[in-house]
Structures are given as C-alpha cells and as structure tokens.
Amino acid sequence: MSPFEMLKLLGVVLRGEAGEIAGILLFTLGIVLWILIPFYDRSREFGQRARAAHYFGLLAVFALLATTVIGYWTIR
C-alpha cells in the first residue's frame, strides 16, 4: 500500500510523466541505498557513519508506515 500511496502523492506534486519518472527513480534509489548500507561504514571503529544511516533508515521506515496508514485510511 505504501508504494501506491507514495506514487499517488508524487502525482499530486508532479503532473504527468514527471511524477511517474520521479516515482521510479525514488524507489530505485531506495533499493540501491538499502543494498549499499552494509558497505557504508567499514573503516570507522566507532560506527559514526553507521549511526547516521541508522537514523535515515528509521526515517524511511516511519515514512513507509505513515503512507501505508494514509493509504488504508483513504480507502475506508
């Protein structure tokens, strides 16, 4: 439900093909970042950069949860 709702919200902001392309790029970027996270902080001893990635990941999870709730709320 979350991807559908995110694409619907992007369609409001960006009309036509621009919204569709932005949605595809947004989800592709998210998948690429998710794949690259294990390689992000290999050289630091205390994991300072990993903490930033952790908070970014929490923000992404909350955004996915929020758009899922909004999506189910609108179909009721």
Image: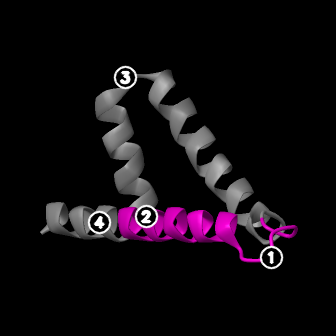
Q: Type of residue at label 4? A: Ala
Q: Marks 3/1: CA distance?
A: 46 Å
Q: Is residue 41 left or right of residue 50?
A: right
User: What is the x, y in percent for residue 40?
Assistant: 78, 63
**Residue matched to label 3:** 15
User: Which label's residue is closer to the chain start, 2 or 1?
Assistant: 1
Looking at numbered disc 1 in the image, what kind of residue is underneath it? Answer: Glu
Choose mark 2 or mark 3, whichever is in front: 2
Residue 54, given in percent of the width and then of the height, sits at 57, 71
Distance between the alpha carbons at the discs numbered 2 and 4: 10 Å
* Magenta highlight on residue 39: no
Q: Are marks 2 and 3 in contact (CB under 8 Å)?
A: no
Where does residue 57 sit, x and y in percent of width and height?
Answer: 54, 67
Nearest the camera: 54 or 62?
54
Residue closer to the observer: 18 or 63: 63
Q: According to the image, label 4 marks what residue? A: 66
Residue sticking out furthest to the right: 43
**Residue neighbourhood size for the residue with mark 4, other residues' Cα within 10 Å, grouped as few (<14), some (14–19), many (≥20):** few
Q: Residue at x 68, y 63 (%)?
A: 49
What residue would you read off at disc 1?
Answer: 45
User: Where residue 33 appears, x then y in whole percent?
Assistant: 70, 57
Marks 2 and 3, Cα distance to the nearest angstrom? 26 Å
- The amino acid pointed to by label 2 is Leu
* Magenta residue span: 41-64
Front: mark 1 or 4:
1
Quarter of the figure with the N terminus: bottom left
* SS at circle 2: helix
Asked if the residue at tag 3 contacts the one at tag 4, i.e. Cβ–Cβ closer than 8 Å, the answer is no
Real-space Cα distance between discs 4 and 3? 23 Å
Q: What residue is at 66 percent from the left and 68 percent from the top?
A: 48
Q: Of the residues under marks 2 and 4, which one precedes in the sequence?
A: 2
Q: Is residue 18 above or below residue 61?
A: above
